[in-house]
Every structure is written in structure tokens, then in C-alpha cells.
Amino acid sequence: MQDELPPFHLSIPVSDLKKAREFYLNVVGCKEGRSKANRVDFSLFGHHNCGNVLEFKGQPHERIFATE
């Protein structure tokens, strides 16, 4: 049995970087890493969590499972 979770990269679409920063830094307790105008990286307890700004259109299932 493995005691530790291997490091992973998680990319999460966000609509607002300011709100994403507030949540991941102040609520979750992550540390901020690199950032650009359309993304921000966080250290999620040793794992890489990246918030990428995306424009959301349509219903949630259409945004995630688009076939076009």
C-alpha cells in the first residue's frame, strides 16, 4: 500500500482569477506560484493546481463534453 499520493497536475477552468486567487489562497490554503493575465498556478500541498480563465457558454455539460 502506498502512503503518499504521487504528485499530480490539475488544470481547472475559472471565470475570474481574482475570485480563484481568493478561494485557493484564503480558503484552501494554497501558495501562489507563477501567473499570467489568463492563468494562475497554485501549490496544492505539493501538487500543481492551475486555474485557467475560460469563457463559459452553454450548459455545464455542453462546456465540458463538447463534441464539435
Image (tube, rainbow, N blue to C red):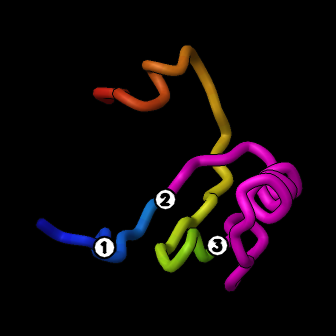
Determine whether 62 is above or below 19 in the image.
above
**Residue designated by label 1:** 4
Residue 56, horizontal then vertical, whole percent: 64, 32
- The amino acid at mark 1 is Glu
Q: CA distance from mark 1 to mark 2?
A: 21 Å
Answer with mark 1 or mark 2, whichever residue precedes in sequence: 1
**Residue designated by label 2:** 11
- The amino acid at mark 3 is Phe
Residue at image x 50%, y 73%?
A: 48
Mark 1 lies on a secondary structure that is loop
Q: Residue furthest left?
A: 1
Determine whether 57 is above or below 36 in the image.
above
Closest to the observer: 33 or 30? 30
**Residue designated by label 3:** 42
State yes or no: residue 17 in magenta.
Answer: yes
Residue bounds of the magenta highlight: 11-40
